[in-house]
Amino acid sequence: DVNVMKDVTLGFGQALDKCRQESDLTEEKMEEFFHFWREDFKFEHRELGCAILCMSRHFNLLTDSSRMHHGNTEQFIQSFPNGEVLAQQMVLMIHSCEKQFDNEEDHCWRILHVAECFKQACVSKGVAPSMEMMMTEFIMEAE
Ligand code: M21
């Protein structure tokens, strides 16, 4: 559900600062990670793919070939409140997106395409959190 997705996004987003430098993702390209859910967000910067790669590594969510580690990813999602309601579905959605872009050899570009595909899947299934929700929670957490 949308609330779980909101929490997972904010949790995953905690690694953004750590990953900015090595991915060259400037604040101009993405201010905060939750902007991912903006309706008009453009998946055009390879740096964002590199940042998601770095963030995923930070949480140990990738295999040696930089594909999603299913078990660790499921556990990561389950570590959030009610995460178990979404864990399997998210892993399946990401995996089906991965399969569509498996021929892309550049990890950063591939992960950027997978991320965009995953977002579209979330929107169609009605599990994408609204920007209003994301911003409210983000501000509350900062206070
Ligand atoms: C729900 C929170 C954040 C979403 C982030 C991006 C998800 C993109 C998944 C990329 C997984 C990388 C797979 C590598 O083949």
Image (spheres, rainbow, N blue to C red):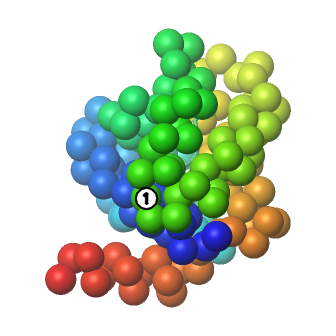
Report if residue 26 is visible in the image: no
Query: Relative to 140, does residue 16 appear above or below in the rendering?
Result: above
Q: Which of the four quarters of the rendered structure image does ligand 1 lie in?
A: top right
The spot of residue 34 in percent (x, y) is 45, 66
* The quadrant where residue 38 appears: bottom right
The spot of residue 80 in percent (x, y) is 43, 58
* The quadrant where residue 23 appears: top left
Query: Relative to 140, does residue 50 appear above or below in the rendering?
Result: above
**Quarter of the figure that contains the C terminus:** bottom left
The spot of residue 87 in percent (x, y) is 61, 50
Q: Residue at x 37, y 46 (%)?
A: 25
Q: Residue at x 67, y 46 (%)?
A: 88
106 with respect to 139 (left or right): right
Q: Is disc 1 placed on a helix, strand or loop?
A: loop
Disc 1 residue lies near ligand 1 with CB under 8 A: no
User: Observer-nearest residue: 90 or 45?
Assistant: 90
